[in-house]
Image (tube, grey):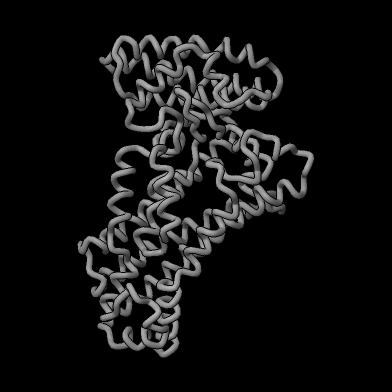
Amino acid sequence: MNDDPRAAVLDGLSILVKEKLPLCNTDCRDGKISLEKWISEIRPIITQIATLIHRKPEPDMQILQILGLILTSGERNAQTSGKQPGWIVTQLPRIEEALIISAAGQRAPVLTADLYWEENIGQPPLSFTAEPYEFFFISAVRRQTELRRQVNRDIRALLRGHVSLATAEGASVLRAATHAMSLARTEYIGFHNGNSVGGERRPLMSPAEFNTMRSWLVPTVINGEEYSGPNAAYIGEMAVTDYLIGTADEEYDQYVRGFERYQSQPEISQTGKDRDCTPLVTIFIESLGLDPAVPEKFEVDELARRLALAPPSLISSAKEFANFLGQFVGSSGAHIGLIRVYLERYVEEAPSNCAEQAPIKASTGVGGHSHAHTRRLHEMRRASPLIRNFVAATKKLQARGF
């Protein structure tokens, strides 16, 4: 039993939003009700929340989550009717103030990735449409994030010296990270390959469903500032692995710093720590007596020679790290494959679907970055000289029977 009246009211509003908002959204999307009707149906919920905040103004992530979902829903319905981002805010009295108060200057006053995916843990979760493919996508992002969290946790243990690379435990920890990364890669591949149903293989989410769902992740304007919609790429655990292993370059760092305002304070703090760490590939290189600051001075043969002289436990860890890197780059490549199938080919094969006229165009990411940007990130991982030489040296060592 909940003895906190405020919490009880919020829980009731959360249930109301969970039950009423998706129905209003799909009815508006499908032309069963007008945008004006949607606004009139949703206003009373906002009034109740704004009144609650007025009585006790304070940061509240649950309120921010509920209001953010409502506002993003309204933006999608308004923008597909030709309205500009921010127009719907003027039609929903008190929502802007309530969003700003609940965010308390600690984060963006909108629905962010952690609120739509990571912290959206109810059964069923809060959603725009309550349609099966949206629930699948929420679940898929949550699984990817949890797998990446496991990967990062294992690597941090090695970086902080809690587990030594030159031990059997070090190799075991890397093996566990590799397994989690392999599962993440398999999830990406399975997204499109799907399951066999009646002898016919169907994707877990069709391109049409994906683009319909994606149309809800629209930008908005609060207090004169534009914010992008929820973006899974901005989840902290998904962003920091490149820092931890050593594939991040300066351009990548600038990219990650650019979406800090969409992260929670704990995410920002953790990202900063991971950014400042000595990456795993550097630790490996230094353990071989080489200077990672001058990679041009050691070639694959020299790396392989040094590895051959290393303790057997360190060689085992090196091989496991090479396996991990293969899965990490492979997972990145699988993600590129999904972009090709679900966005680029979708437009090419069905030009009349108006994908480029939608609020979120198929030619860009939710954050406005081009697909060329995402491909560059993949190339950064695949072609990093330090990583590439290390993997090649490890394979050469294995070919010699080590």
**How far from the left and from the top, in percent, is residue 196?**
66, 53
Among all residues in the image, which is located at the extreme left? 162
Residue at coordinates 65% horizontally, 43% vertically from top-left?
362
Residue at coordinates 33% horizontally, 24% vertically from top-left?
60
Question: Relative to 209, does residue 47 appear above or below in the rendering?
Answer: above
Question: Relative to 60, does residue 137 appear above or below in the rendering?
Answer: below
Total marks placed: 0
**How far from the left and from the top, in percent, is residue 398?**
41, 84
Q: Is residue 289 left or right of residue 350?
A: left
Residue at coordinates 69% horizontally, 41% vertically from top-left?
208
**How far from the left and from the top, in percent, is residue 63?**
39, 22
Q: Is residue 44 visible?
A: yes
Q: Quadrant of residue 94?
A: top left
Q: Is residue 180 visible?
A: no
**Viewer-nearest residue: 259 or 194:** 259
Q: Quadrant of residue 293?
A: bottom left
**Viewer-nearest residue: 92 or 174:** 92
**Viewer-nearest residue: 155 or 9:** 155
